[in-house]
Image (spheres, helix red, strand yellow):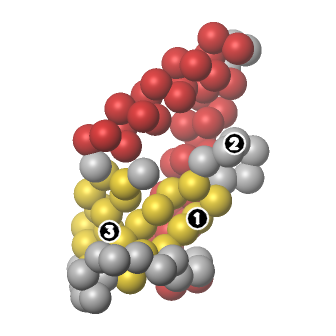
Amino acid sequence: MSLRVDFDVEKELHDAVRWYESKRASLGLELLAEVDEGIQIILRMPLRFGLLETRLNKQSAVRRYRLHRFPFALILGLMKTKFMFWR
C-alpha cells in the first residue's frame, strides 16, 4: 500500500504544530508524535475505523481516526492500494 498526504493537510499540520509550540514548549512535538502514531495504526489496521458518508467516488471508502489528546482527526480514503489523507 502507498500513502499520499494532501499538501493542504501538511500545511495545516505544520501551522497547528507552530501554534501548540507557542502555547507550551514541546506541545507541538507531542501533536506530531500522536499524528505519527495514528498513521502507523491506520497503516496496520485500515479497516478498523468507522466509515464516513461522503459524495466521493464509490471506489473509495472514507474512514476517520480521531486523535486522543488533540481536537483533530485523520481522514483517510482507501482506494484499492493507496491511502489518502486530507482535512
Classify 5 as above or below 45. above
Say left or right for 63 vs 30. left
**Relative image position of residue 54 (x, y in whole percent):** 40, 76
- Amino acid type indicated by mark 1: Tyr
Outermost residue, front side: 55
Classify 55 as above or below 7. below
Classify 58 as above or below 75. below
- Amino acid type indicated by mark 3: Phe
Q: Secondary structure at mark 1?
A: strand
The residue under the point 63% across, 11% down is 22
Q: Nearer the viewer, mark 2 or mark 3?
A: 2
Q: Secondary structure at mark 2?
A: loop
Say left or right for 46 vs 81. right
Q: Which mark is residue 70?
A: 2
Decide: few, some or many residues near mark 1? Use Cα within 10 Å; few <14, some 14-19, many ≥20: some
Q: Please tell me which of labels 2 and 1 falls first in the chain.
A: 1
Question: Are the residues flagged by discs 2 and 3 in contact, CB closer than 8 Å?
Answer: no
Decide: few, some or many residues near mark 3? Use Cα within 10 Å; few <14, some 14-19, many ≥20: many
- Amino acid type indicated by mark 2: Phe
Q: Secondary structure at mark 3?
A: strand
Question: Are the residues flagged by discs 3 and 1 in contact, CB closer than 8 Å?
Answer: no
**Relative image position of residue 69 (x, y in whole percent):** 75, 45
**Relative image position of residue 76 (x, y in whole percent):** 42, 66
Q: Which residue is mark 1?
A: 65
Outermost residue, bottom side: 58
Q: Which mark is residue 83?
A: 3
Measure the C-alpha gap from mark 2 to mark 3.
22 Å
The residue under the point 59% across, 40% down is 33
